[in-house]
Image: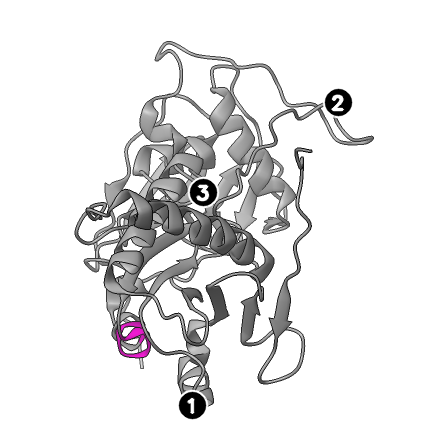
């Protein structure tokens, strides 16, 4: 008799109690254990004494993910928490071994490679990397063991709340829900289909720092927007204008982004203005071009230009 499915049991232990904090997610039939917590709680997690030994880990936030491995996770995560280039990281997911079955170096490296590859293929986040992960040389017998542990780990990551390995788009969207407009058909202007760079994610409500201190402005059809570079992305700053109308030449990807932005509840009316809305949070894009297209609702837009410092002297 061939089994078509196998039931599983996931155990969620919350050392600090409550519903939101530090979670240790395990399955007694598996060697893998997932520790999930806000990176800001690292000191408390360290004090709890449960997180030790070899691991692979995922840092996520703002539509970005960083995937690494370490034999000393607390020290390594502390280094990341103090790294200005990791300011995007809000949540940490650490995959390690259960008691008596710690991850060795080859397992951590293999998981880093596999998780990085999976995250890139799904494309729900931008994966930022240091050195490009390389799959370690593993004997076939050990690789089959890794396969089983990895399968369990992916399920436990899902149960821990790590969603970056699930596609953001359903395989079959089906009919639109009542009251929800159907997605418009693809429309391409003179530039043809969306470029490959246009597939990058949009992150709404990010907390970002300027990479080089430079600020840029964008002007289009009475619209004024301000932006800056941060962590390999371009951020449209809170207080910027977002044009309401969408030109017919706009491609389908940009239309979807604009629909998401308008549904997010982060745009407010500007008194006396009917063609624009005011952005209340920071929104990150993979490129300056995408940011401009979404803000303007247009396929052909002017470039962002450097905003020169201005000083206003008030009389005493």
Residue 233 lies, in percent from the top left, at 31, 47
Extent of the magenta region: 72-77
Query: Which labelled disc corresponds to residue 229?
Result: none
Is residue 142 found left or right of 205 in the rendered image? left
For mark 1, give the secondary structure.
helix
Q: Mark 3 points at which residue?
A: 202
Using the numbered discs, state the Cα–Cα distance from disc 2 to disc 3 in whole angstroms: 24 Å
Q: In this view, does 203 lie above or below 221?
A: below
Q: In which quarter of the image is the N terminus?
A: top right
Task: Give the residue drawn at x 37%, y 51%.
Answer: 146
First of labels 2, 3 by sequence position: 2
Q: Name the residue under label 1.
A: 47
Is residue 68 found left or right of 91 in the rendered image? left
Is residue 13 found left or right of 86 in the rendered image? right
**Within 10 Å of the Cα at label 1, are there few (<14), some (14-19), or many (20+) other Cα atoms?**
few
Q: Name the residue under label 2.
A: 175
């Amino acid at each position: 008799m061939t089994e078509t499915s196998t039931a599983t049991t996931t155990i969620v232990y919350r050392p600090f109690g409550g519903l939101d904090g530090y979670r240790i997610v395990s399955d007694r039939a598996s060697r893998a254990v997932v520790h999930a917590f806000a990176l800001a709680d690292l000191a408390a997690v360290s004090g709890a004494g449960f997180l030790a030994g070899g691991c692979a880990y995922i840092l996520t936030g703002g539509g970005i993910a960083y995937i690494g491995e370490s034999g000393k996770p607390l020290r390594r995560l502390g280094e990341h928490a103090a790294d200005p280039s990791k300011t995007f990281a809000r949540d940490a997911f650490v995959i390690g071994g259960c008691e008596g079955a710690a991850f060795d170096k080859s397992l951590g490296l293999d998981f880093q490679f596999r998780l990085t590859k999976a995250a890139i293929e799904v494309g729900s986040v931008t994966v930022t990397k240091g050195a490009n992960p390389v799959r370690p040389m593993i004997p076939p017998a050990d690789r089959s063991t890794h396969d089983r542990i990895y399968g369990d780990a992916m399920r436990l990551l899902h149960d821990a709340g790590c969603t970056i390995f699930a596609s953001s788009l359903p395989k079959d969207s089906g009919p639109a829900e009542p009251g929800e407009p159907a997605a418009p058909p693809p429309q391409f202007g003179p530039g043809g289909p969306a470029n490959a760079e246009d597939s990058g994610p949009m992150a709404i409500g990010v907390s970002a720092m300027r990479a080089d201190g430079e600020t840029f402005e964008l002007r289009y059809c009475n619209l004024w927007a301000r932006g800056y570079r941060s962590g390999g992305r371009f951020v449209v700053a809170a207080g910027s204008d977002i044009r309401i109308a969408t030109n017919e030449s706009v491609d389908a990807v940009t239309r979807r982004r604009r629909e998401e932005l308008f549904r997010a509840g982060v745009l407010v009316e500007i008194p006396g203005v009917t063609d624009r809305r005011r952005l209340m949070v920071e929104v990150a894009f993979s490129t300056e071009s995408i940011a401009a297209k979404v803000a303007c609702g247009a396929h052909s837009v002017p470039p962002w230009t450097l905003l020169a410092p201005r000083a206003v002297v008030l009389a005493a």
